Image (cartoon, rainbow, N blue to C red):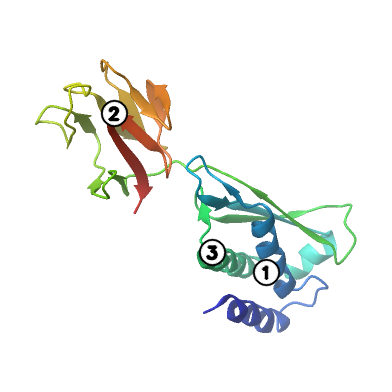
Amino acid sequence: MGLKGIRDAMGRASSRVLRTPVSPRALGHKVTRLLDKERTSDTHGHPIVPNHLIVAFAQKDRDRFGNAEESLRRQLIEVAHTHARLKGLGLTGPLSIDFATNPRFRTGRCDISGEFRDAPIGDEAVLVTSDGLQIAITTPQILGRNDDCGVVLAGSNVSRHHAEIRADQHGLFIVDTGSTNGTLVNGIAVDTHRLLHGDIVSIGDHELRVEVV
């Protein structure tokens, strides 16, 4: 369903349930305008937009949405996802929307703000090499020159057991295991680093991009 179709469906569905000066269709327009306004580029030059939105209502408008709030949240997330996909815009983490009440707002006023939130990733991720090869991440996973490593990386500037990817309750992280030439994430030398979607891990001459699958 295209963006216009989603907005039309939102308007039809909500008009049967909600009687409020703040219409879901208007909210959909506000969401897409915010994404376009807050568009920026990540460290690799890729266009990105906020992945966490906060929708603030007047108290009366918030009360009128009642039990339809969760349905509205899902619909607005779908609008944002569709807009980002059509415009080729990336997200730094899962898209989420929170609703808030501003006691200073008059009925009919609604403001939307956005935040960039990096989200730790879980085990469903891969390392992508510079030539596009995808290597599934399984933890614990050692990266290095030795044949017994989970990810074997050739080169004299790669240690035998160079680094290790581990997991905890918060997601994945990489640990430099005493390598000679160090482990870099996004160009910065690290001892231990929480891995996020889009991170670039540099070991020797190898660059590995972390991606959620």
- Tell me the mark number nearer the camera, choosing from 1 and 2: 2
Amino acid type at circle 2 is: Ile
Image side of residue 53 versus residue 119, left or right: right
Query: From this viewpoint, which residue is outermost toward the left?
Result: 147
In this orientation, does residue 5 appear?
yes
- Tell me the mark number nearer the camera, choosing from 2 and 3: 2
Q: CA distance from mark 2 to mark 3?
A: 34 Å
Q: Assess disc 3: are there few (<14), some (14-19) or many (≥20) residues with their C-alpha within 10 Å of its C-alpha.
A: some
Image side of residue 150 versus residue 166, left or right: left
- Mark 3 secondary-structure assignment: helix
- Mark 1 secondary-structure assignment: helix
Q: Which comes sooner in the sequence, label 2 or label 3?
A: 3
Residue under label 1, please give it. 28
Residue 203: assigned label: 2
- Residue at 57% in and 55% down: 96
Residue 161 location (% of width, % of height): 19, 23
Q: Quadrant of residue 138?
A: top left
Residue 133 location (% of width, % of height): 23, 49
Residue 108 location (% of width, % of height): 85, 67
Count of number-bearing discs:
3
Residue 81: assigned label: 3
Q: Which comes sooner in the sequence, label 1 or label 2?
A: 1
Q: Assess disc 2: are there few (<14), some (14-19) or many (≥20) residues with their C-alpha within 10 Å of its C-alpha.
A: many
- Residue at 89% in and 52% down: 104
Q: Is residue 177 above or below residue 91?
A: above
